[in-house]
Amino acid sequence: SVVGWIRRAARSRGLGTAVARAASTRGRAVPPKFGIADPWSALRSVGQWRGEIWNRRKDGEIYAEWLTISTVNDAAGQTTHYVAIFSDATQLKPSQERMDFLPNHDALTGLPNRILLQDRLSQAIRRAQRERGRLALLFVDLDRFKKVNDTLGHEVGDRLLEAVARRLGERLRGADTLSRLGGDEFLILLDGHSSAAGAAAAAQACLDLLRSPLQIDTHAIPLSASIGISLYPTDGMDAETLIRSADLAMYHAKERGRGNYQFHAPEMSIAAQEQHALENALRGALARGELGLLYQPQIELATGHLWGVEALARWAHPDLGAVAPERFIPVAERIGLIGELGEWVLTEACRQLVRWRTAGFAVPRIAVNVSIQQLARSNLLPTLQRCLVESGLVPEDLEVEVTESVIVGDNARVITALSDLRSLGISLVVDDFGTGACALGRINRVPIDRLKIHGSFIRCIGRGQSEEAITRAIIDLGRDLGLAVIAEGVEREDQSAFLQAAGCRLAQGYLFGEPMDADALGVYLGRAAVH
Ligand code: C2E
Ligand code: CA
Ligand code: CA
């Protein structure tokens, strides 16, 4: 085994390096004192393992050995050798690595200790500050660990802690840090963009991981844990405060009967629960017929004629009432429902256009919103084709609205999808134009048909000179590129007059009509025909 080989090599030389051929060291070997990380998986994934092992001298004395194992690959990427660099940690004059490792790691589990965790947490906070990111800290405390120690002895207790460390380590993602504070306390730093709901899910996963008993020798030891959660920036702006908040929250979890998790701010528990409930409710919403569409007229400024309608999704939640798309579209994206939802929107929009026309209302076209996730994840093109075939509509009846960031982004799949639907003959509108990371040089990568000026500019007409200048510039840009420009969020006559004078062709907003259901739009059109 690799351990035997390391031990032999170490014993014969005391200090130095050893090389072993990969073939002779294959197989699983997890020595008891290797600490938490399985050296084989570390070697496989990052090509290196570092840690401390306990060794025995010829005279029987036990000593600490500081060891680095690296893999050596051939040109084909196959591991041919392992190189071990080891040193008698008790004798060696303090090398930098040892100085780095020993004070920062927990001797029992090999996990980062409080000092290192605080360091990593501070780094993560600085990064989150820069990038406006979020962090979550999970304070994990085993329930009734003292009882295990008292009844089965410290040796079993230590082994149990090692096993817990291993289990908790299983579900960590790359940027996460698991550390041991001492005793039966562990801290998990969830890096990246950890929302309250994400932290709650991670805490639940930890509780689930610990649910099945741990086998130590002949003992199957049932375990549970109490977890406290603190969030950056809500519960603290520095490492110490965040740890303290998570610790406090952990005590709440103990008070609530152990084996559960709690947030530091109680409203977070509620928010996370609500989010969870929202996700579950949305899963069944389509089947229960709770999703609906409203339609908002788009008019031609010069004539006042209807140019088309935009379909806007609504969710009639049984308890919450009408839920805005800004709230449920991101949820649908997160839980992988956006493809299905988007397909429903497209199908329903096409059917409705046919219904109006059958009823004698001349609705020239219908626009639907499509999110970047929808373009990246679902297969939009076949859906569009199916909708056209089923409804008997022509591609010119349909417009797809995507935000500016979608167009200038770097997702090749998205760009291809957009070009494909455009080549079908479906018009492409750049929504919220002027707000994204507008890279004018990049918008012509995708053949677009229309620019839609974001409502925030329109709102400032008559008040903000720079917004007026941007509005004019977008209209001029559209004219030069041969793209019709539409203004959204037009609420007042003076805004409409400004746009018309500036040469804007199309407009949409409360001034002309709020989003309304299909029947109301029929009434609206009937009224318009009378006048
Ligand atoms: P959007 O496409 O920019 O839609 C314009 C939003 O402004 C709509 O909000 C509309 O109700 C509102 N609005 C219209 N006229 C006025 C006005 O004169 N003044 C003001 N203050 N607001 C006005 P809504 O319906 O809540 O939709 C919000 C966003 O949700 C939409 O922004 C769109 O990005 C997204 N969305 C809506 N339906 C869908 C959908 O079916 N799929 C996807 N992926 N996204 C959708
Ligand atoms: Ca839109
Ligand atoms: Ca918009």
Image: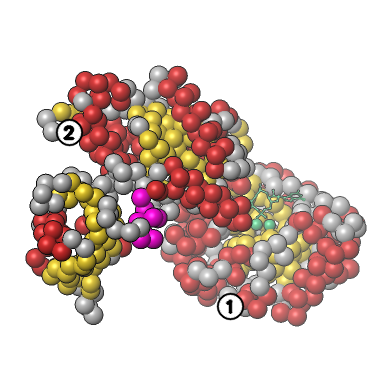
Q: Which residue is mark 1?
A: 445
The answer to whether 229 is drawn above or below residue 13 in the figure is above
As for residue 62 lying within the magenta part, the answer is no
Residue 442 visible somewhere in the drawing? yes
The answer to whether 247 appears left or right of 144 in the picture is right
Residue 7 image offset from top left, x and y in percent = 14, 56
10 Å crowding of disc 1: few (<14), some (14-19), many (20+): few
In depth, the one of 23 and 387 nearer the eye is: 23
Which residues make up the magenta segment? 95-102
Residue 19: x and y in percent read 17, 69
- Viewer-closest of 220 and 531: 220
Between circles 1 and 2, the one closer to the viewer is 2
Circle number at residue 216 = 2
Q: Quadrant of ligand 3?
A: bottom right
* Position of residue 332 measured from the top left corner of the image (x, y, whole percent): 49, 47
Horizontally, residue 156 falls left or right of residue 183, namely: left
**Count of numbered circles on the image:** 2
Around disc 2, counting alpha carbons within 10 Å, would you say few (fewer than 14), some (14 to 19), or many (20 or more)? Answer: few
Q: Position of residue 346 (x, y in %)?
A: 53, 55
Name the amino acid, label 2.
Ile
Q: Earlier in the sequence, mark 1 or mark 2?
A: 2
Q: Quadrant of residue 316?
A: top right
Residue shown at 58% from the left, 65% from the top? 406
Q: Magenta span: helix, strand or loop, mainly? A: helix
Q: Is residue 169 left or right of residue 203?
A: left
Q: Residue at x 90, y 56 (%)?
A: 463
Residue 97 on the magenta span: yes
- State the image quarter where residue 306 is shown: bottom right
Residue type beneath disc 1: Arg
Above-or-below relation of 433 to 322:
below
Task: Identify which residue is drawn at 66% across, 63% down.
Answer: 436
